[in-house]
Amino acid sequence: MAFRLQEILHKYEVGAGAAVLRFITAAAAFLAVAVVFDLAAFRNLATRDAMDAAQVGRNVAEGRGFTTSFIRPLSLYLLTKQGGNESSNTLPPVDRHPDLANPPVYPGLLALAWKTKPFPVVDLSKKQNFSAYFPDLWITIWNQVLLGLAAWLVFVLAKRLFDSSVAWASFALLLLSETYWKFSVSGLSTVLLIVEFLLLVLIISRLEAAARVAVPGRNSVIAFAALAGALVGLMAMTRYSFGCLIVPLVILIATLPSMQRPTLVVVTLATFMVVSAPWVVRNFQLSGTPFGTAGFAIMSGTSNFPEDQLERSLHPLIRQVEAGEYWQKLFTNLHDILVSDLWRLGGGWVMALFLVGLLVPFRNPVLGRTRLFLVLTMLALCVAQALARTSASTESPDINSENLLVVVGPAILMFGISLFVLLREQLNLGGPAGRNLLWALLYILAGAPFLLAVIGSHPSRLVYPPYYPPWIQQKSAASAPGGAIMADVPWAVAWYGDRPSIWLSLKYIDRLSPQIREDFDTVGRLQPIKGFYLSVRMLKTLDAKDLAAWSQSKAPDSQLELVQKMVTELGQRLVEQDAKRDDVERLRAIYKVVERNWVQGGGDDWESFILGIFVKKEVPTGFPLQKAVGGIVPEIFLTELSERK
């Protein structure tokens, strides 16, 4: 009996059971950190790309196919152009609009999450005390499971490339990184991409080793090359920008120490195409473009398409964008990336220290080749991030889907830790105690932002302004069925309201371009619009310049014209009746007071439309949606006069 007990203790101290015990301990630590962070810092979805992917995933889960309820005017343009004419006859029903913005992998994962949600869908429209939207929390839990998988992959990869000390330190520092936890609650596909990228790096390390000890008759090298190409294809189908990684991967494979290099390159490209080509063909069939609306991101931010105007355009003048503007966008955004984004990489300013780890030469050829791939990947992602940047990066500078470099951060972390371990062993710091103090200092510096986020003041779980799910659901339910809601936050209407929503057209009325109009009526002829929603997102942008422009743009006013006609007729009658001069002058004085205080303004843009409602307390004449739901403060929501019951 004593011998058996001793055997069990030995097993869990130094034997195979020790690994199991360490795994359970690490998993428990990860779960504890996740619970603490969520209790302190969880917020509902805050970015349009997260809500966009979520509502597409729900549509897939509910059997509506890969359709979207967030309709971009640019998508309408592509579909009508592919259909051969700009007519609503070429468009699918508004509730079956094909999604042309998202690749399929992440929405597919969210569809699985929606299918497995452990709670029913709740009507929030009458809820008084609202805090957290449970589907948002469920998406967060799925992403944090992926983050746990990423932490485990970092450990496995670091142990394979370096040793156990680097592996545990990399695991711990990833666990203490506030940025990655923020991405886990953002609802974006970033954490999934991190998992995919770490798997790619793991396969590349195996590929390099297999190429050096290739055995005739065994095709392990070819198998690893095929897996690498397929993984890059999978990443491209998670976020289109990551398709650029095929370039550094092919360069790496073309320089392998193997006589099979040509075959390996062909196999890599073939598996990449097998994974990505079917979706590209689907996009071509629907829109005539390989990447749908996402492929036009390179034009966003040029002089013709500032801010979000490209995706809101029904007739984008694509050919007017000159080549020089692309170069200008590239160099301008590269400057910002090199100054700011590159030195953070998701791990805070401490990550800048770890970048130096990529400069250390390694005798191990696997490490050297892996480092080469990481450097080439960072160069490719810098270019892709600079060219693909849109207004989404402006709205959320740090946590957004266009932050590509953050995906490489965990892999860079391992090389930085290896350099730290090397320096720690070479420094004379008074023995083990001094070296342990250095470890503690590193953990404190790297984890300080996370600790402050947990113990500091906690922000509201609501992302308001501008998103308050109960209001959005209430307004969506008030709109008549069979049409869409035009909104300045269509992604939120699509996700929280579960109604088709079209992004706000460029103008309210387009009088300057009668042939190619970019206004409400033109969109309404393509898709029926049953509701109109302007949130505080747009209302808070109004300023004195908008008011001045509105007041100086005199629009036709039937009521003022009626007053002028009545005063003229009455004055003429007084003159014909030889009325006293004082009576005529009194009438003129009254008219001057009326004219001076009559509120008159106009303009073709939505700012003028909003100011007209605020000042005149009425919807402009001729606008088809005249019924205001819930007043005009703090948000504007208009429907048809027959309000839905």
Image: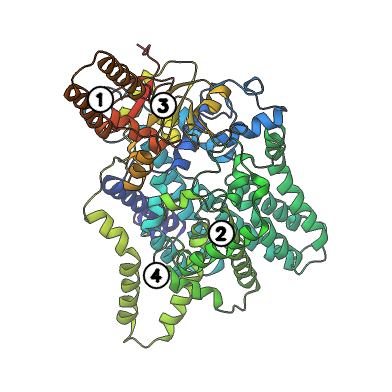
Per the rendering, the mark at residue 350 is 4
Nearest the eye: 396 or 443 = 396
Along the polypeptide, which appears first: circle 3 or circle 2? 2
Counting from the top left corner in percent of width and height, residue 621 is at 40, 22
Amino acid carrying mark 3 in the image: Phe
Give the quadrant of the C terminus: top left
- Secondary structure beneath dot 3 equals strand
Amino acid carrying mark 1 in the image: Lys
State how far apart marks 1 and 4 are (Cα). Answer: 44 Å
- Secondary structure beneath dot 1 equals loop
Q: Is residue 145 above or below residue 155?
A: above
10 Å crowding of disc 1: few (<14), some (14-19), many (20+): few
Nearest the eye: 8 or 175 = 175
State how far apart marks 3 and 1 are (Cα). Answer: 23 Å
Name which quarter of the figure residue 580 lies in: top left
Along the polypeptide, which appears first: circle 1 or circle 4? 1
